[in-house]
Image (cartoon, rainbow, N blue to C red):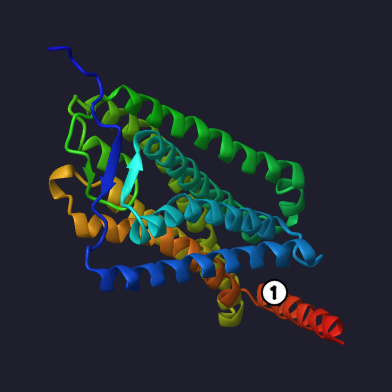
Amino acid sequence: MENQTTTVTSFVFLGFSYDPLIQNFLFLIFFFIYVVTLIGNITIMMVIRSNSNLNSPMYFFLSHLSFIDICFSSVTVPKLLFNIYATQAISYNSCIIQMFFIFLTATTEIFILAAMAYDRYAAICKPLHYVQVMNRVFCRWLVSGAWAVSFFQAMANTLPVLKLVFCGPNIINHFSCELPSLLALSCTETSLNTIMFLITAGILMIFSFFVILLSYINIVSLILKIHSAEARRKTFSTCSSHLIVVVLLYGTGCLRYMRPRSASSIIMDEYFSIQYSISTPLLNPIIYSLKNREVKEAIKKLIKKLIKKANDCMC
């Protein structure tokens, strides 16, 4: 009998439930989350680009974070909605492509969060040199570097998967094509894939986490030296939004990818993935708009301007 290198040409997502009522409910929930995610992040981008007062590096990074959140959410949620409404199957090629873009967008977001942490460090701890350090060229290099490194990391983890043989079963115990779910279905040895992921992801996450940790250690040490309670509150409030986002993304991402396979749970894996790939892009614009007075004021002005234009058009 002739050996077949690949017998699986498509995968089937296990999803959440086959009950039609539950499926309809989940479709409405995820559709609502996706729409709000798009509206929220697009609003943040529009507000920052249209308001001359929001031209500092912090808002430059926040605008890019919103763009990445749109991309990150769009990699999984539209396909998830289609799976709930129509079919739960995905072709082999589409699955590989989705996994690549999950790596690309998630890693880029991690680096942007590290850049934002360094920006807060420079603004709070080195205020006299802030303009020189965080100049526009340097900020653009940070964003470009984030995308470039993330691209190579995504390629380094995607290309080895193409060499794996999938001979069945083809049921993915998840709602998206993430690396752990695919490795669990391979008929061949996946230790090299695991080692490659641990090396690349480990180095990048340790580096970015070290930047964030070191930045906030210096920030906190400076805050503790401030005698005024009001001044301490204002200083910390500029960082609290970023800290919340970092904890949400890093915490759930590490629990999803860094746990040993023996400790894996389908329900927990889905919960963690929903948190960092669906909920975090939704929460980012909400967190930053609620915790940032300048953003709230800019959003109010934009809404008033849009209402005024709408009234003028009606007249």
Residue depicted at x 21% and y 60%: 267
Question: Which quadrant: the N terminus?
Answer: top left
The residue nearer to you, when weighing 127 against 156, is 156
Q: Secondary structure at mark 1?
A: helix
The three-letter code of the residue at mark 1 reads Glu
- Left/right of residue 92 with respect to residue 77 in the rendered view: left
Please determine whether, in this image, residue 198 is positioned above or below residue 242.
above
The answer to whether residue 180 of the structure is visible from this angle is no
- Left/right of residue 122 with respect to residue 215 in the rendered view: right
The residue nearer to you, when weighing 189 against 1, is 1
Label 1 packing within 10 angstroms: few (<14), some (14-19), many (20+): few
Question: Which quadrant: the C terminus?
Answer: bottom right
Where is mark 1, residue-wise?
294
At which x and y percent is residue 193?
A: 29, 28
The answer to whether residue 83 of the structure is visible from this angle is yes
Please determine whether, in this image, residue 28 is positioned above or below residue 270.
below
